[in-house]
Image: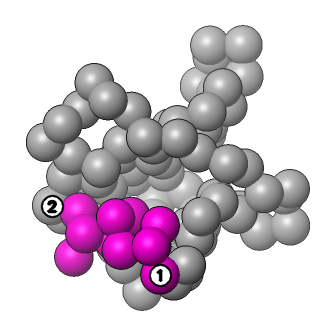
């Protein structure tokens, strides 16, 4: 379901919520983490077998049950969400 979540989300504007080690987040057409400002993510063409979306600060990656979100600042990992599952 995680792999299909992002594709369906773009067309239907449905929200998917994830719970991970390190916190939780939700994805619709944008990424929203708690009270932080929304982040627009674009598809990463370099990962054709997985759902991968990113911008300059965030990278979302989902391949079957392996789901991660990485928050970077100046190419340094600030926070890493792992062991995520769809709520």
Q: Judge left or right: residue 22 versus residue 65.
A: right
Q: At x 28% / y 24%, what residue is drawn? A: 46
Dominant SS of magenta comes to helix
| Category of crowding for the residue at label 2, using alpha-carbon neighbours closer than 10 angstroms: few (below 14), some (14–19), many (at least 20) | few
Q: At x 70% / y 63%, what residue is drawn? A: 32
Which residue range is magenta in the image?
1-12
Look at the picture and state if 6 lies above or below 46. below
Can see residue 24?
no
Along the line of sight, the residue nearer the viewer: 60 or 73: 60
Per the image, is 47 magenta?
no
What is the number of callouts on the image?
A: 2
Image quarter hosting the C terminus: bottom left
Q: Residue lying furthest front in this view?
A: 11
Q: Which residue is mark 2?
A: 64
Q: At x 72% / y 13%, what residue is drawn? A: 74
Q: Secondary structure at mark 1?
A: helix
Along the line of sight, the residue nearer the viewer: 75 or 15: 15
Q: Judge left or right: residue 33 versus residue 2.
A: right
Per the image, is 10 magenta?
yes
Q: Which residue is mark 1?
A: 12
| Category of crowding for the residue at label 1, using alpha-carbon neighbours closer than 10 angstroms: few (below 14), some (14–19), many (at least 20) | few
């Amino acid at each position: 379901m995680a792999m299909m979540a992002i594709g369906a989300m773009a067309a239907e504007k449905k929200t998917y919520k994830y719970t991970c080690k390190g916190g939780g987040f939700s994805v619709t057409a944008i990424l929203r983490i708690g009270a932080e400002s929304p982040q627009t993510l674009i598809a990463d063409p370099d990962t054709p077998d997985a759902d991968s979306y990113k911008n300059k600060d965030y990278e979302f990656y989902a391949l079957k049950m392996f789901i991660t979100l990485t928050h970077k600042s100046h190419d340094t990992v600030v926070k890493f969400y792992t062991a995520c599952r769809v709520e």
